[in-house]
Image (tube, rainbow, N blue to C red):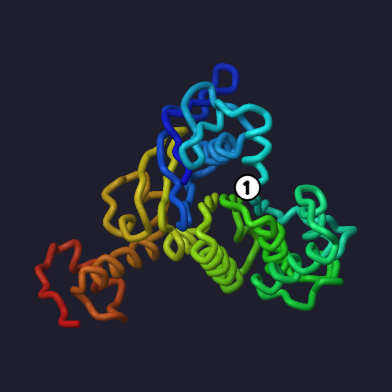
């Protein structure tokens, strides 16, 4: 678990983060969302130690990172896996070389153990048999999965994913979401995902922090979002008429008041007219 308490971060006279607190829970997908300029990237960089907050606390399983000595911080970083937005694979290396590179840097395994571990994580992300291919020879979705394999090869306690669905088609995005969710649950990792993808929010948002103008505007989960009355959050999540209608349907389905397949227009009428409907029998 990662606990953030009252962190503030400024660059010169410009305050980027102001008094943000929150908990990123173990075994859950913790999503950081917000519009461009909301501070989510700076927030994430503070949490992983790339930026030092002006004030506040960032604790990993009860230990304040900002009070750690150099050796403790190095040990902590080795427990953090990173999936970068562009996958950040080495073009001149094969898939297996990209993954073994991390083991070469941060482990004392023998070569056979490195190969065994590399094959294990490739199988986990359903890429068995692509070992000898170069990044240019595989699809965008496959590159993301290689990036995930590399991120988990050291069995991290914490996994950070920066826009994991960026540049992917909707179907592939769902595959990546499911993979991240399964890995988080199976290995009981504290996973933090920075995303603009609203499908990810609704599918894997076990815990969500919504940042607005450098402050935490809302905190909850993907079920809470459906019933949220927060104006800024609703404008961000349900920006279009279509999504507003989808929210209306989902609210009534969750409450058991309409059958699946009810039209958007009918669902919105029910909400607008505040109709009292009997709960459907299971």
Residue drawn 78% across and 71% down?
138
Relative horizontal placement of residue 118, taking residue 200 as reference (left or right): right
Q: Residue at x 64, y 65 (%)?
A: 168
Residue 74 lies, in percent from the top left, at 68, 37
Label 1: how many Cα within 10 Å (few below 14, some 14–19, many 20+): many
Position in image of residue 135 (x %, y %): 82, 64
Residue 37 appears in view: no
Answer whether residue 106 is visible to the viewer in this image.
Answer: yes
- Is label 1 in a helix, a strand or a loop? strand
Residue 71, horizontal then vertical, whole percent: 68, 32
Left or right? Give the position of 92 relative to 221.
right
The image shows residue 245, relative to residue 7, as above or below, that is below
Q: Residue at x 65, y 70 (%)?
A: 125
Q: Nearer the viewer, residue 78 or 131?
A: 78
Where the C terminus falls, by quadrant? bottom left
Seen in the picture, residue 271 relative to 107 is either above or below; the reply is below
Counting from the top left corner in percent of width and height, residue 152 is at 65, 58
Question: Disc count in the image?
Answer: 1
Image quarter of residue 180: bottom right
Looking at the image, residue 128 lies above or below residue 35 = below
Q: Residue at x 63, y 34 (%)?
A: 72
Q: Which residue is mark 1?
A: 80
Above or below, 133 relative to 187: below
Q: Nearer the viewer, residue 232 or 56?
A: 56
């Amino acid at each position: 678990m990662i606990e953030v308490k009252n962190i503030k971060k400024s660059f010169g006279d410009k305050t980027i983060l102001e008094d943000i607190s929150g908990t990123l829970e173990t075994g859950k997908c913790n999503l950081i969302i917000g519009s461009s300029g909301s501070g989510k990237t700076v927030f994430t960089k503070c949490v992983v130690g790339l930026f030092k907050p002006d004030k506040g606390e960032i604790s990993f399983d009860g230990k304040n990172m900002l009070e750690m000595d150099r050796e403790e911080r190095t040990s902590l970083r080795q427990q953090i896996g990173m999936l970068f937005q562009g996958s950040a694979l080495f073009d001149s290396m094969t898939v297996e070389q990209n993954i073994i590179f991390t083991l070469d840097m941060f482990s004392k395994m023998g070569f056979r153990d490195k190969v065994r571990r590399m094959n294990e994580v490739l199988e986990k992300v359903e890429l068995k048999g692509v070992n000898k291919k170069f990044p240019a020879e595989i699809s965008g979705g496959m590159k993301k999965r290689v990036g995930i394999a590399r991120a988990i090869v050291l069995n991290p306690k914490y996994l950070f994913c920066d826009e994991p669905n960026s540049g992917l088609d909707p179907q592939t995005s769902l595959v990546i979401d499911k993979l991240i969710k399964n890995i988080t649950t199976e290995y009981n990792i504290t996973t933090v995902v920075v995303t603009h993808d609203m499908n990810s929010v609704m599918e894997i948002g076990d815990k969500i922090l919504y940042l607005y103008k450098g402050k935490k505007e809302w905190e909850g989960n993907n079920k809470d979002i459906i019933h949220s009355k927060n104006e800024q959050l609703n404008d961000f999540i349900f920006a279009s008429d279509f999504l507003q209608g989808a929210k209306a349907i989902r609210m009534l389905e969750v409450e058991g008041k309409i059958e699946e397949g009810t039209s958007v227009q009918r669902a919105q009428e029910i909400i607008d007219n505040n109709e009292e409907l009997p709960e459907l029998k299971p």
